Image (cartoon, helix red, strand yellow):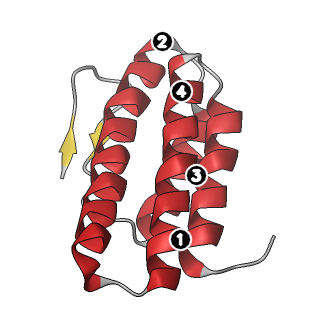
Amino acid sequence: MSWTWNDTDPIEQIEDLAADTLLDFVLRLAETGDEEGYFSREIEMNLVWREADAQVAFAKKGRETEEISKRLYAVRAHVYDAHYLVGTRQGVEAAKKIQDAIRTLYGIEP
């Protein structure tokens, strides 16, 4: 489902940290160039943060292995950094941080 507040840059719903969800987000981040686009990406970034934070909360309850918990904390740190970069209108750098989050989450070496 897409939300929109303008006609040029819809806001995509982000409900998980699946690779395809995050890769689609990376593409939108890297292509963002105007204020309307960054406003949309900030809202989406909040949704990514919510998902990353929820996964850490789940891990805190002891429902994940230690290795997975470490990855989830690292993913949340990458998302935090990306969130800051979106706020400073650095879409390409934010996209790189989300790529780091994907690699960390899925145990992929750079």
Separation of residues labelled 1 and 2 (CA atoms): 33 Å
**Residue 82 in the image: above or below residue 65:** above
**Circles 3 and 4 in contact, beta carbons < 8 Å:** no
* Viewer-closest of 8 and 45: 45
Q: Amino acid at mark 4?
A: Tyr
Whichever of labels 2 and 4 marks the residue nearer the N terminus, that label is 2
- From the top left corner, tell me how far across and down residue 83 is, in percent: 49, 33
Q: Which residue is mark 3?
A: 98
Residue at the location (21% across, 22% down)? Answer: 5
**Circles 1 and 2 in contact, beta carbons < 8 Å:** no
- Frontmost of labels 4 and 1 is 1
Residue at the location (22% across, 30% down)? Answer: 4
Whichever of labels 3 and 2 marks the residue nearer the N terminus, that label is 2
- Frontmost of labels 1 and 3 is 1
* Viewer-closest of 97 and 38: 97
- Frontmost of labels 1 and 2 is 1
**Residue 13 in the image: above or below residue 60:** above
Separation of residues labelled 3 and 2 (CA atoms): 20 Å
| Corner quadrant of residue 7 | top left
Residue at the location (61% across, 69% down)? Answer: 104
Whichever of labels 4 and 1 marks the residue nearer the N terminus, that label is 1
- Frontmost of labels 3 and 2 is 3
* Viewer-closest of 42 and 104: 104
104 relative position to 66: left or right: right
- From the top left corner, tell me how far across and down residue 39 is, in percent: 38, 20
Q: Which residue is mark 4?
A: 84
Q: Which residue is mark 2?
A: 35
